[in-house]
Amino acid sequence: MSQSSPLVEQTIAAFREAYGHEPEVVAFAPGRVNLIGDHTDYNDGFALPCALQFGTVVAAAPLADQRIIARAVDFGAEQDELRIDAPIAPLGQGHWQNHVRGIAAGLPLFGLPQRGASLAISGDVPQGNGLSSSASLGVALGLALAALAGERRPDRQVLARVAQWSEHQYVGCACGLLDQTASAFGEQGSALLLDCRSLAVEPAPFPADTTILIVPSGVARGLVDSAYNERRMQCRQAAAHFSVESLRDLDEARLMAGQDGCDATIFRRARHVVTENARTLLAAAAMARGDLAELGRLMRASHASLRDDFEVSVAAVDALVDALNAAIGEGGGARMTGGGFGGCVVAVVAADRLANVERALSAHWQQAGQPAQAHFRGIPSAGARLLRG
């Protein structure tokens, strides 16, 4: 994302129109796609996300008093105004303003500065597809407000934690740290092997002559309104049954040994997390050696586990995954990605299989009797950064 990109220019122009002057700070934070390792983050496990070229831009300038005025360019220039020298209350669930309010409330709690500000916000992360537009917004807001108050290089782990806290306390989603960490730490040309317990991040270079393909299923998803929070509670119940701090501490042998006396649904939730952690580590190693056949095998197994053990897939997504995997063969693989219940499918595809995949997608939509969904290529991109200021 450069200062000359259409999204940045649009956001700066909206700021100028709203406030009559130039912004002092322009911040960008990307969305992400998760290649493998879903529902492991809030279980202290492993994930393999990749920051994307899409994201959120926040243009900001200081105000002399203790107010934040925020304008959402993508929502008809809707505006919110709040004071930061008084308790900040959330609005009802589903309001974009809660992201602004949550970040404004969270920054000082995590030791980051803030001040009165005027903001313009715009983004181009495809909505309802599990690509973390919410995390992108939170991280971009945190970076812009901290920079405006003098902290141009905030600790990226702290920035991710502020955005997560905002999700928990103001947005209403008990998410883990995967999305926010990927948005804050993304690296050009690489995915990230993320240890969700230590928050250690290790670049996983993307294999040459390989493409990330992101295919919307046509089923929009709403994370807060889905069973995400229920799954998180079930994982806590599983950890309690196996007497571990989190499911990260459970291996497959102990899982099987403790199956007796465990509720069948709770056991399946635990089995997904335990096996998904193992798959994620193997997938990072497969990427490092360019083994697309092994990576594809792991992605297929991940989807089956999310479908059968964690029960967060839907029939339309399963059919799309099957069509893609048949076309890809051993040149990669496809799986659902994100929280589930719709959204996107992600595929890692060898360049020489792309034409075959395109044909398979056309046939899939025709057979399903649906309009073809506009799919796109994901570019492994850098994380949150200041474009001005």
Image (cartoon, rainbow, N blue to C red):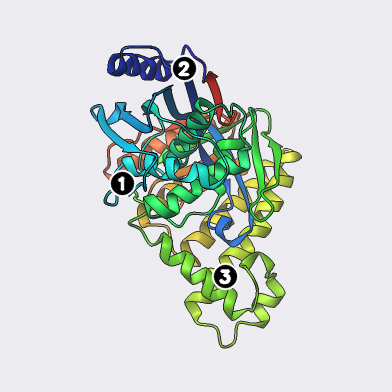
Element at label 1 = helix
Q: Mark 3 = which residue?
A: 270
Q: Residue at x 48, y 71 (%)?
A: 234
Q: What is the number of the mark on residue 9?
A: none
| Distance Cα–Cα, label 2 vs label 1 | 50 Å
Mark 3 vs mark 2: give the one in front: 2
| Distance Cα–Cα, label 3 vs label 1 | 33 Å
Tell me the crowding category of disc 1: few under 14, some 14 to 19, or many 20 or more residues within 10 angstroms, Cα based. Answer: few
387 vs 45, left or right, is left
Q: For residue 257, which quarter of the picture?
A: bottom right
Work out whether residue 297 or residue 86 is closer to the camera in this orientation and state it. 86
The numbered mark, 3 or 2, whose residue comes first in the sequence reads 2
Q: Residue at x 58, y 49 (%)?
A: 36
On the image, the x and y values in percent for residue 205 come to 70, 34
326 vs 247, left or right, is left
Q: Amino acid at mark 3?
A: Ala
| Distance Cα–Cα, label 3 vs label 2 | 48 Å
Q: Are marks 2 and 1 in contact (CB under 8 Å)?
A: no
Q: Is residue 18 visible?
A: yes
Tell me the crowding category of disc 3: few under 14, some 14 to 19, or many 20 or more residues within 10 angstroms, Cα based. Answer: many
Mark 2 vs mark 1: give the one in front: 2
Work out whether residue 240 or residue 217 is closer to the camera in this orientation and state it. 240
Tell me the crowding category of disc 2: few under 14, some 14 to 19, or many 20 or more residues within 10 angstroms, Cα based. Answer: some
Q: Residue at x 50, y 49 (%)?
A: 164
Q: Mark 2 = which residue?
A: 24
Q: Residue at x 68, y 33 (%)?
A: 207
Q: Are marks 3 and 1 in contact (CB under 8 Å)?
A: no
Q: Is residue 67 above or below residue 48?
A: above
Q: For residue 201, which quarter of the picture?
A: top right
The numbered mark, 2 or 1, whose residue comes first in the sequence reads 2
Q: What is the number of the mark on residue 368?
A: 1
Mark 3 vs mark 1: give the one in front: 3
